[in-house]
Amino acid sequence: MVRFTVLASGSKGNCSVVTGGNTRILVDAGLSCRELFRRMRLVDEDPATLDAIIITHEHSDHVAGLAVTARKLGIPVYFTDGTHRAWVRWLSPRKQMTHTQWLERCREQAAARMAEADAAPAEECDPEEAELSSQSAPVEKAEPGVAKTAPEKDPTWLPSVRFFEAGKPIQIGDISVSPFTIPHDAADPVGFVFQAEGVRMAVATDLGYIPPNVKAQLKCVDLLLLESNHDLEMLRDGPYPWSVKQRVLSRVGHLSNEAAATYLETEYDGQAAYVILGHLSESNNLPELARLAAERALNGRASLLANRLLLAAQQEPMSTICF
Ligand SMILES: [Zn+2]
Ligand SMILES: [Zn+2]
């Protein structure tokens, strides 16, 4: 049976579980290990049955509980090389740049990737970015499937690190995973389409806008977890400093209710039995505003009335969706 459960979604922690055949994957680990396990048990999922963890990007709301969870379960963690390097750099005691410099570099890289995604919907490796990463990161790359040696007190030690690239599908047990680049201010952020037993489930949160390569990936999915981060007016009038507002609103920030609704109204193909709105901001959004914007968009298209619209929450897991 294929199942999808959002354990948490929002700027204080993101985590979902995808099950297909005999395989169970944790998508991001943005909750503490203890909370993550508690929530899994709440939805009758046994943490011990997880086979792997896969990471979208290195922001703390996606990796806060990663190391502890992976070690406790002894399971492999799948990253892009860029995300792994960024994660290691920030957990390593010897930082090579200030956080401001690091954020600036992430923005530049995201802008370069964005330009590329705009130009060509097909995924391509960016040699410039690869060069940048290799220059600045002192991280030893583990071979796929091979555990790094376990130095005492190394906060970045994981039982096993495996790498994937955006645009190149991989197989994890019974689940095939298609990672795709998203425009967001992290080192090498991705969304995923998971496929098992003929069911396709897409995860697309943490993106400043929806470029052509993402639109292509979101076609013909049975479940769509789409970001609906903020209400534009609430963000503009809200408590964030101007620089943070600019970051959220930028092309490598987060998707607004309005942008998600525009996509649903104009370009979404209507194939998903479940549309889940996720990564809602607690400061700059209200669940009802997000729901209303998406409902209006879907209701405007008579053919989409069968789509079930759901909201993922920060504080509690969603009921499991079964196919
Ligand atoms: Zn996030
Ligand atoms: Zn993020």
Image (cartoon, rainbow, N blue to C red):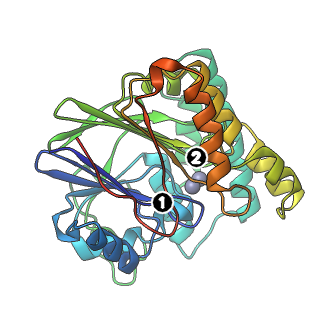
Secondary structure found at label 1: loop
Q: Which residue appears at 36% of the width and 33% of the height?
A: 273
Q: Kindly tell me whether mark 2's CB lies below 8 Å from ligand 2.
A: yes
| Residue drawn at (56%, 16%) of the image | 120
Mark 1, ligand 1, within 8 Å: the answer is yes
Looking at the image, is 27 positioned above or below residue 71?
above
82 with respect to 38 (left or right): right
Residue type, label 2: Asp
Residue at the extreme left of the image, as rendered: 22
For mark 1, does the 10 Å Cα neighbourhood hold few (<14), some (14 to 19), or many (20 or more) residues? Answer: many
Residue 167: name its quadrant.
Answer: top left
Q: Position of residue 320 (x, y in %)?
A: 30, 55
In this rendering, position of residue 261 left or right of residue 150:
right
Residue hosting label 2: 206
Q: Of the residues shown, which amino acid type is indicated by label 1?
A: Asn
Quarter of the picture for ligand 1? bottom right
